[in-house]
């Protein structure tokens, strides 16, 4: 084959998945060469970043040399998160030391993993995640912190921070991610990637769950390019038989929306955190306003406006009830997986605090919170409805992705003495993202700005109506063309 050392270690590292798959189709590189090159890159930089915690190099090499499915991403290497995705025979620890000590392994592929394999992807490893995916930073006690490749003093966001670091540093072009309160968008923002949270029900959580956290959890990927995200959503979208609900199918494949110029859109801009949950850092506000100017220059109407319901402070109470009840379920499921109940000694301080809080929720309280969250969601979603239907006629909402730039390692971590410290600090990183896990709307983080003093990425969020990922893809591709980000390289890269 024609690959050179420079191609394997540098140029290839930042080719997106669509381009890498095209190399295989044209016979310029084999799946084995793509996988070997990715493994070399992981071995080069992972010790500094701690992104890949479960390498599966030998298995991946064997899979790459075998009869791979002839899917759209045949031979392309990727990573999956050690949460939200079970792969048969591989570790499944959720960032938890009890599952780590028990050596828990998956006994089947989830629907998502099966779809990725059918598309031809080769999984070369599993990535770091906060314990049970509860934090917007990836610093589990079980595996230690994942460091931001742009500035290793800082975190990568969470809970998909390991995947984001692996993609941002050029180890692989694609990392699986899940989002229950911002866990696709937050690490995408922190690591300078594109992160699209699909509509609730777009990607099946089967066969092990119909929904998670009352439908707040969705799954997809983090990528460098918009076209990768759209094409992979085409791979993952659609229900598994028996799913309790699913999003209406798109009019055409999402990949075909890339390059389609959107009509003139009416976009609302908001730079104050919902319900005043956190102060917005001037750098994050500036990034959102800069994005507003860019969108205006592209012909869109941008005005300062947002759903009034975002200022209702009852949101956090209802979100927390659903979250803590979900933690009780997840912890008990983990205990059943290893044959014993988990205790405080098996968990981090904040996880145990969430667990104990969840035990206080009655079934009636849970249903009341869920109904209140649904009512609140209707009030929020109406803002996107046409004026003649009682709405305000907006197409998109633009906000910062996070209220602060990526934090210093250790800043968002709880202690035994102060178990709620992590939750208090987490609010600044999830306050703009979590509301749209509650509503189920699609939302994305776009990497348009870098903070000069510390070389840290700062993403902006755009939110669309339910089932309108096609609109987000069109706008994201328009922004990508107007201000390309693919040429940027972090300080630590393969």
Image: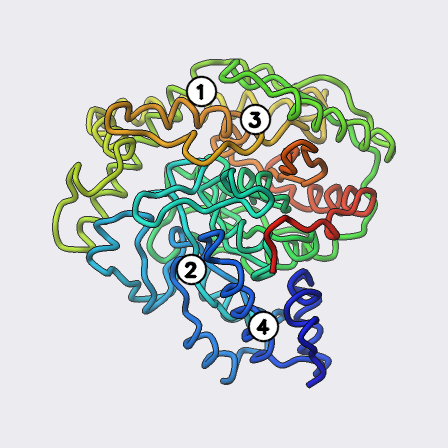
Residue count near mark 1 (Cα–Cα under 10 Å), binned few <14, some 14–19, many ≥20 = many
Is 450 or 122 nearer to us in this picture? 450
Circle nearer the N terminus (1, 3)? 1
For the residues marked 3 and 2, what is the alpha-carbon distance in whole angstroms? 28 Å
Circle nearer the N terminus (2, 4)? 4
Q: With 266 as the anchor, is 443 left or right in this view?
A: left
Circle nearer the N terminus (1, 4)? 4
For residue 411, what is the image quadrant? Answer: top left
For the residues marked 1 and 2, what is the alpha-carbon distance in whole angstroms? 33 Å
> Is label 1 or label 3 in front?
3
Residue highlighted by disc 4: 37
Quarter the C terminus occupies: bottom right
As helix, strand or loop, the secondary structure at mark 2 comes to strand
| Contact check, label 1 and label 3, Cβ < 8 Å | no
As helix, strand or loop, the secondary structure at mark 3 comes to loop
For the residues marked 2 and 4, what is the alpha-carbon distance in whole angstroms? 17 Å
Q: Position of residue 487 (x, y in %)?
A: 75, 52
- Residue at 71% of width from left, 72% of height from top? 22
> Is label 1 or label 2 in front?
2
Residue highlighted by disc 2: 126
Residue highlighted by disc 1: 315
Q: Position of residue 41 (x, y in %)?
A: 56, 65
């Amino acid at each position: 084959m024609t690959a050179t050392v420079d191609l394997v270690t540098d140029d290839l590292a930042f080719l997106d998945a669509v381009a890498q798959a095209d190399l295989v189709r044209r016979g310029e590189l084999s799946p084995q060469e793509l996988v070997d090159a990715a493994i070399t890159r992981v071995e080069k930089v992972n010790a500094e970043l701690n992104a890949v915690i479960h390498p599966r190099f030998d298995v991946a090499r064997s899979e790459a040399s075998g009869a791979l499915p002839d899917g759209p991403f045949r031979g392309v290497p990727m990573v999956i998160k050690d949460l939200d995705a079970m792969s048969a025979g591989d570790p499944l620890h959720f960032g938890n030391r009890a599952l780590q000590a028990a050596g828990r392994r998956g006994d089947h592929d989830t629907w998502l993993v099966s779809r990725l394999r059918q598309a031809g992807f080769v999984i070369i490893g599993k990535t770091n995640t906060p314990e049970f995916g509860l934090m917007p930073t990836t610093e589990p006690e079980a595996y230690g912190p994942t460091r931001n490749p742009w500035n290793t003093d800082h975190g990568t966001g969470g809970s998909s921070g390991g995947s984001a670091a692996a993609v941002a540093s050029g180890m692989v072009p694609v990392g699986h991610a899940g989002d229950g309160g911002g866990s696709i968008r937050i690490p995408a923002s922190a690591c300078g990637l594109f992160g699209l949270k699909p509509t609730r029900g777009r990607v099946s959580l089967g066969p092990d769950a119909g929904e998670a956290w009352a439908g707040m959890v969705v799954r997809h990927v983090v990528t460098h390019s918009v076209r990768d995200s759209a094409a992979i959503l085409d791979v993952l979208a659609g229900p598994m038989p028996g799913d309790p609900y699913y999003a209406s199918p798109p009019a055409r494949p999402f990949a075909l929306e890339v390059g389609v110029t959107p009509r003139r859109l009416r976009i609302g801009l908001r730079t104050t955190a919902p319900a005043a949950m956190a102060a917005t850092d001037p750098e994050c506000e500036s990034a959102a306003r800069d994005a507003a100017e860019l969108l205006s220059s592209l012909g869109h109407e941008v005005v300062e406006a947002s759903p009034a319901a975002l200022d209702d402070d009852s949101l956090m109470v209802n979100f927390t009830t659903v979250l803590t009840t979900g933690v009780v379920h997840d912890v008990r499921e983990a205990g059943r997986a290893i044959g014993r109940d988990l205790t405080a000694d098996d968990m981090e301080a904040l996880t145990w605090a969430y667990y104990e809080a969840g035990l206080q929720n009655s079934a009636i309280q849970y249903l009341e919170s869920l109904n209140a969250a649904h009512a609140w969601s209707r009030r929020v979603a109406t803002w996107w409805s046409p004026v003649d239907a009682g709405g305000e006629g907006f197409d998109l909402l633009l906000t910062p992705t996070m209220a602060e730039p990526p934090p210093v390692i250790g800043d968002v971590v709880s202690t035994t003495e102060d178990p709620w410290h992590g939750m208090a600090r987490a609010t600044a990183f999830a306050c703009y993202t979590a509301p749209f896990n509650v509503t189920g709307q699609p939302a994305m983080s776009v990497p348009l700005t870098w903070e000069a003093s510390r070389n840290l990425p700062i993403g902006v969020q755009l939110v669309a109506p339910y089932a309108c990922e096609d609109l987000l893809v069109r706008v994201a591709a328009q922004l990508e063309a107007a201000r390309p980000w693919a040429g940027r390289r972090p300080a630590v890269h393969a």
